[in-house]
Image (cartoon, rainbow, N blue to C red):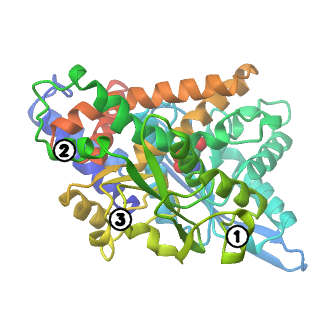
Amino acid sequence: MAKETGLIVQQSLDALLQDMDFLPHLKGLDREQAFRSLGAILSTPNHIHKSYLRIVLDSGNVVRVPAFRIQHNDTLGPYKGGIRFHESVNEDEVTNLATLMTLKNALHEVPFGGAKGGIIINPRDYSVRELYMICKKYVQYFSDVLGPDKDIPAPDMGSGEREMDWMMAEFKNIHPGQPYRGSFTGKSVVNGGSLGRREATGKGVYFTMRYMLHDFLHNQSSWLGSETSRDNRYLQTALGLAERPLKLAVQGFGNVGSVAALEAYQCKLLQNKIVAVSDRNHTLYNEDGLDVPALVDFVAAHGGDLPVSADQLGEAGIKAELLDREAVLTMDVDVLILAALEDQIHVANADQVRARLIVEGANAPVTGDADRILDDKGVIIIPDILANAGGVIVSYFEWLQGRETQFYSEEEVFRQLVDKMQHTMKSLLPAFFGGSHSLRTYGYKHAVHKLSATLYRLGKLY
Ligand code: GLU
């Protein structure tokens, strides 16, 4: 999907052009001109920074590691977005992910713009000292364009609180005497990180599903008005799911997938059974439901990997069949949570997906073509922009706490997280269940609307 972010921006603008409540005072050619300007602004990044970091490896060899920081748009506040450490990182991908951050922040009313960073490495191939050097060099090379009021990186795939701590320390070295706590988020709690930041994305992912199937549908009288019809196909799907015990499969058992799976397992409001989870090695399957807390403990004690053999399953007292890694995607389940990599559901496997609800914990796990195939089949997708925003929302709380040097309790962080995500869900779901477009389209439209109104008022459209 990320590849098509530009296209979606354009489609959202086309839909807004028909909406006469939007920029109502502009008519005719003036209106068309404003929309063309919006298209030009939102479909291109403001800045693409690229450097080759010079790293001395443990062997003494010197290598150059390609790295990016792409700043898409800062209309709503300082640039914000993670730094991805992965071999497949490239300029187009980082640009699209930066665009997604602009839209995600706009949608959830987080006062930041959108950016993304990337380093083309497989972190597993580097020693701790080498990774430390890569993090320091990243900050040295990009130090002029980063900062608490300029651009605030965070973790993404392949990076975590350790890397953010190292990077903040280097930022502080380079800019002595200047505020530094808000320069990076996703730090460890001892270094000014927020309680609950680590769990925030996974918790938010599960919350969006629970909110749609439980809280929202149980309260139909408050929104099932004239614009909604009982035979809306999405509403039919959601009502069907809300009425029965649910079988769930979770792809990815890292920071996002494991937390979402645990939330689902512990939830008393829906009758969930997690029948499958997967990681880079295998899918674990048990039709009676997996013991998720035992799996979380196992993973914590085994370097992040799920059990890989019958012996390991036996030792941990976990009952499960070991299937191949991809099996998780096409299981006979009600809900599929995608919390691994991007482009996991594509044209070649979309038809085999049996889940009726897909929740995107990762960014862009469903390709654009697959998105259309699934939508035609009536599958509901809670898109990345909506489902996985818990991370950046709590990053925003972390940034605020760093400024005030007043820290919230974990309970307070989760209360505010739920408030914010609930507010966004409430603003999208009535239109979604009353209309004919995907939730992704409503999410993009809402975000582009917010950005457009701001840009117009700033006098940037003509
Ligand atoms: N990398 C995460 C995302 O894609 C979090 C970004 C942040 O906290 O700034 O949303």
How far apart are the alpha carbons under marks 2 and 1?
Answer: 42 Å
Label 3 vs 1, first from the N-terminus: 1
Left or right: where 343 falls relative to 30: right
Give the image location of residue 301, x and y in percent: 78, 59
Left or right: where 16 falls relative to 142: left
Vertical placement of residue 440 versus 318, above or below: above
Numbered circle sitting on residue 236: 2
Q: Would you name the residue on which mark 1 appears? A: 314
Kind of residue indicated by mark 1: Gly
Q: Is mark 2 within 8 Å of ligand 1?
A: no
How far apart are the alpha carbons under marks 2 and 3?
Answer: 19 Å
In which image quadrant can residue 130 be found? Answer: bottom right
Give the image location of residue 193, x and y in percent: 73, 35
Give the image location of residue 51, x and y in percent: 66, 63
What element does badge 1 sit on? helix
What element does badge 2 sit on? helix
Residue at figure coordinates x 24%, y 45% from the top left: 240
How far apart are the alpha carbons under marks 3 and 1?
Answer: 25 Å
- Given residues 421 and 289, the one toward you in this image is 289
Kind of residue indicated by mark 2: Gln
Residue at figure coordinates x 53%, y 46% from the top left: 265
Asked if one can make out residue 96 in the rendered structure from this viewpoint, the answer is: yes
Label 2 vs 1, first from the N-terminus: 2
Kind of residue indicated by mark 3: Asp
Q: Would you name the residue on which mark 3 appears? A: 332
